[in-house]
Amino acid sequence: MLVASLLLAACGTPTAAPTTPPAETTQPPAETTQAPTEAPTTVQTGGEVEIFSWWVGPGEADGLAAMVKVFNADYPQYTFVNAAVAGGAGSNAKAVLATRLQAGNPPDSWQAHAGQETIANYVAAGQVQPLDDFFASTGFASVLPATLIPLISANGHPYSVPVNIHRSNVMWYNPSVVQAAGVTIPAGGFTTWDDFFAACEKIKATGKVCLSMGNEGFTAMHLFENVMIGTIGADKWNGLWLPTPTTDWAGADVTAGLANYAKALSYVNSDAATLSDWQPASKMVADGDAAFNIMGDWAYGYFANPDPNGLALTPHTQFDWSPVPGTQGIFVFLSDSFVKPIGNKNPEGTMAWLTVAASKAGQEAFNPLKGSICARTDCDKSLFSEYSQGAMADWLSNTVVGSLTHGVVAAPAWQTTIDTALKLFIASDLGTKAQSDFQAALVAACKSDGTCQ
């Protein structure tokens, strides 16, 4: 009977493909490079769904596994394929992804930071589709913060599904190392970088590293953005990235920020360039070899999650946190999101993944382990750590600014030019002449982007 039914099905008239593609496959906005319209496809009810990310480290891998568990339960007809690539806050993954996209071999969805990393890159290149119909049918926009929607949109069309909100400006520290050096961290953290440097002198006198840093990849830029924001403040930081900048890249404010950055680097571990990524630098704090580490709140998952992927440390006893010096009342944010590609193998599987990524269940499974908070505003706060509950309150009350390192404020080409100048600076003697050269390179980078005239 089974064979007969299959033969009858094979002989039947195939279902016609739709003549009009859904609204999500319409052309991108006119200001972007036009993408080819996808050919209509017959609905696919199973198969592999390849999801590309850089979540392989402790904490982040745990969060991804939890969201995949929700996906497998909701969509058992699909096989999840984890195409994650390790390293450098996505720098390695982005390089692999660029090669695949150039070859016309996109995964079914990929992780991308909300903001200019998506808009000025994948949207402009016509590599992803707008998601108007998805947002309308799911009501997703109604549970997102109003500040986030413009950052995932171009010409009013949303192009990605944010799964979380991360905070960049967190300073993690070892309470025992700090106490042994006679350092007291004020409630709310150090208010100036000079106060922090005074603490570093005390810690250095005990033979400990004051500020740990990982390899000179994204971790150096992550430190750079936080020192700059802590020096010039939220309004002037935002002013650097406006279409017509209101903060002068060649001005005294940036000069002061670069001087603080150079001094901060003088307290960094000498082996920073040899460390594989941010986790070894964070572990220096956990092991008591360093007092402080400035890293995003994904580090919370690494510190607190259980073995084998986490260090299973006790908050406030074995590790603690405060805002980066000078950033009280500021929330430096980034958001991980997923996109719908043009020309991928399993578009129906893509929509299944995006549905889980947008869902309350998916975000509640993912974010407590990742160390981030939901992009949605209706998640159950009781599922989250003390740190994350505090971040939720700060997200709603602080002044929000975008991260340079993590794709919010600058187009990828501009960010890359800044990174090149930053690496040259780190390789220098960090003196006044090197700082002046670095600032001149930052001015040139803004002009090269076309933002500074």
Image (cartoon, rainbow, N blue to C red):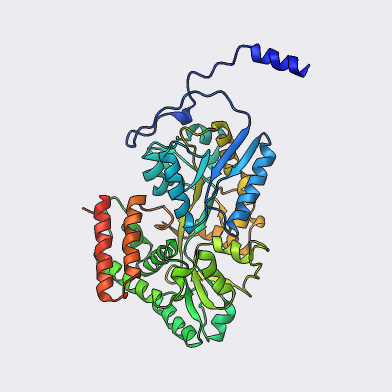
Residue 294 screen position, x and y as percent: 48, 68
Q: Where is residue 322 in the image (x, y as percent from the top left)?
A: 52, 70
Which of 97/188 is in front? 97
> Residue 108 versus residue 399: which sits nearer the camera?
108
User: Residue 433: image x %, image y %?
Assistant: 24, 74
**Which residue sits furthest left?**
453
Q: Quadrant of the N terminus?
A: top right
Q: In which quarter of the image is residue 330?
A: bottom left
Where, by quadrant of the figure, is residue 400 drawn? bottom left
Query: Residue at the right extreme?
Result: 1
Q: Is residue 129 in view from this perspective?
A: yes
Residue 75 in the image: x percent, y percent?
66, 36
- The residue positioned 35% from the left and 32% from the top of the image is 34
- 266 to 91, vertically: above or below: below
Frontmost residue, 434 versus 190: 434
- In the rendered image, the vertical position of residue 324 relative to residue 382, given as above or below: below
Q: Is residue 123 above or below residue 387?
A: above
Comparing 111 with 317, the one in front is 111
